Amino acid sequence: MSFKMPTFNHPDFNDEKFINAPDVKFIEAEADGVAPEYFHSTSMFPEYFKIDGKWTLAKESRMDSSVVINADGSLSVVENRNLKKGDKVILGRSENCEEGIYVHTACFLDNKGKLDDQFVFRQGRSRETSYARDYDNLFELLKHEKENGNIIWVMGPAFAFDYDARRAMQALVENGYVHGIMAGNALATHDLEAGLLNTALGQDIYTQRSQPNGHYNHLDVINKVRRSGSIKQFVEDYKIDNGIMYATVKNEVPFVLTGSIRDDGPLPEVIGNAYEGQGAMREMVKKGTTVICLATMLHTIATGNMTPCFRVKEDGEIRPVFIYTVDIDEFVVNKLLDRGSLTATTMVTNVQDFICIVAKGLGLIK
């Protein structure tokens, strides 16, 4: 089995509806952070806008944002809170050329209307679904993306609570299958706790036995990291030699940790401002070509909203962005689909089992 990149199906701009479409209308934003009435809001699909008779693609897109016409005629997709007074904001709520706007939902369909690749536009499944083929597809995708793409992992803290899952994720990082990690305070905290004390929330990560005064362990670790000044320095100070964050800093893999109102500490690198955190996540997502979201509903939905289904390469070629969401709860994976992220492949399973199967399938662990 070999990986085959789906082919982008370009719109036929010679079609009558494109030729007869009017130019888009726009109006200048009246104030910073305020969109005009009837602003056009973007989706995760490629969107084209007719400006001076020419159809232009908004290259860096995301859901629920406005489109701004720049001075050079290029387009920027901007969150409404980031609009500046005077920005030329495109207007229109139709999507099939009526107002000079075309949302290209069939971008990776062949000319017969069939899916060009099994990774794209998969609908949600259930616990009863067989995932054997999905795993095989994922193994081939990851092998391709390791050398030709950018793989972002969005992770909940479940990995840090299990010995085998930590080992599997460490192996993925060390073997080049991780180009970025996005998570919260908990994943890093409990992974570092495991690295120092072999516990997570005071329980041994292998035997699951609670340790005396174990409820202090993660708080002590947070305090030590804050004393060190950074996760990287803590790893050096305490000679940590295992785990996800150890492998991440050792291999200089970028990570974004975003905070929650319930966080302890937090760790020094955790971004406490929600909108600064969202901005940092979006900057990482912009590089992503495969995004795998694991056991974190909040981060999964946030990432799904800011991840388009396509990426425009430097040479102008348009390729798909593969999005996976994996959770033991069907509600979580279906929630992402309900928000409009229809290009996600969903797998309902325990993420600790999932990551071990992936690492074994890639030949990284036995």
Image (tube, rainbow, N blue to C red):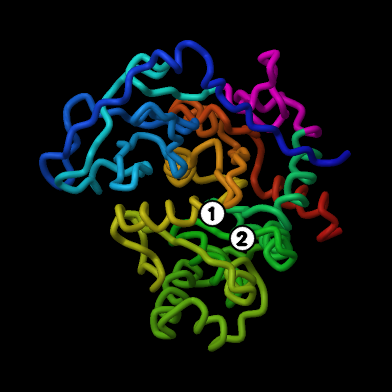
Label 1 sits on residue: 287
Q: Which one is nearer the viewer's eye here, 206 or 111? A: 111
Disc 1 marks a residue whose amino acid type is Lys
| Residue 23 picture location, percent across and down | 32, 24
Residue 305: give x, y in percent of width and height.
43, 38
Tell me which segment is drawn in magenta.
106-133
Q: Is residue 294 visible?
A: no
* Magenta residue check for 281: no
Question: In this view, which residue lies farthest toward the bottom?
Answer: 237
Mark drawn on residue 198: none
Residue situated in front as seen by the camera: 136 or 314? 314
Instruction: Say which quadrant the N terminus sits in.
Output: top right
Q: What number of labels is visible?
A: 2
Magenta stretch containing residue 123, yes or no?
Answer: yes
The quadrant holding residue 320 is top right
Q: Is residue 146 in sight in this rendering?
A: yes
Question: In the image as oriented, which residue stretches furthest toward the left?
Answer: 30
- Using a 10 Å C-alpha cutoff, classify the residue at mark 2 as few (fewer than 14 neighbours), some (14 to 19) or many (20 or more): many
Q: Which is nearer the N-term, disc 1 or disc 2?
A: 2
Mark 2 lies on a secondary structure that is loop
Q: Are marks 1 and 2 in contact (CB under 8 Å)?
A: yes
Which disc, if any, is residue 179? 2
